[in-house]
Amino acid sequence: MNQAVDYITEEKRNTFLEELQDLKGPKRKEILKSLEYAKSLGDLSENAEYHQAREEQGKLEARIAKIEQILQTSQTAKGGGGDIIEIGSKVVVRKNGTKEEKKYVIVGSEEADMAEGKISNRSPLGVALFGKKKGDSVSLKTPNGTANYKIINVS
């Protein structure tokens, strides 16, 4: 896998496709109804409902464009489960000098969520881990100095 490419998992691609379908269908219709109602109220220059509906329409169209761009430019990764760390791999690491093990899933930048243990392949730790295997050690520079990790497991 090329680390410079934008990746999304099959699960995230499906989530984006569902969101896109909702935004282009029911959400667009809802905003169009709001615009029609606001127009019926009269003078558009001082019509707060109209201006708010136009703003919501702009946000909706921007979100649609962003999702379409992500879907067009990202490759779907089916990775994970092998011996080498790539998109979709579940990794257990231990910081040198501690006994605490941390579990991460390597994902594309669009899916990264530290609260869920999902780190981007482009994050400093993701870059250090990418392409490595169980038993390898990695190090990366942090604001507090160099951090060293040992890869305990890859699945």
Image (tube, rainbow, N blue to C red):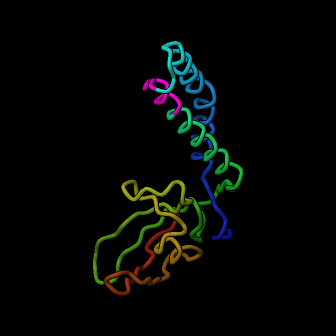
Q: Is residue 25 magenta?
A: no
Residue found 50% across the figure and 82% down from its top: 136
Residue found 63% across the figure and 30% down from its top: 24
Q: Position of residue 120 (x, y in %)?
A: 51, 64
- Up the image or down, 111 lies above or below 25; here it is below
Residue found 51% across the figure and 23% down from its top: 44
List the single residue furthest toward the bottom. 145
Q: Of 66 and 71, which appears nearest the observer?
A: 66
Q: Position of residue 42 (x, y in %)?
A: 50, 15
> On the picture, is 43 further left or further right than 103?
right
List the single residue furthest toward the right. 72
State the image quarter where residue 28 is shown.
top right
> On the picture, is 113 further left or further right than 65?
left
Q: Of 99 and 12, which appears nearest the observer?
A: 12
Q: Position of residue 102 (x, y in %)?
A: 36, 67
Q: Position of residue 125 (x, y in %)?
A: 46, 73
Q: Give the extent of the magenta segment.
A: 46-54
Q: Quadrant of the N terminus?
A: bottom right
List the single residue furthest toward the top. 40
Classified by dominant secondary structure, the portion drawn in magenta counts as: helix
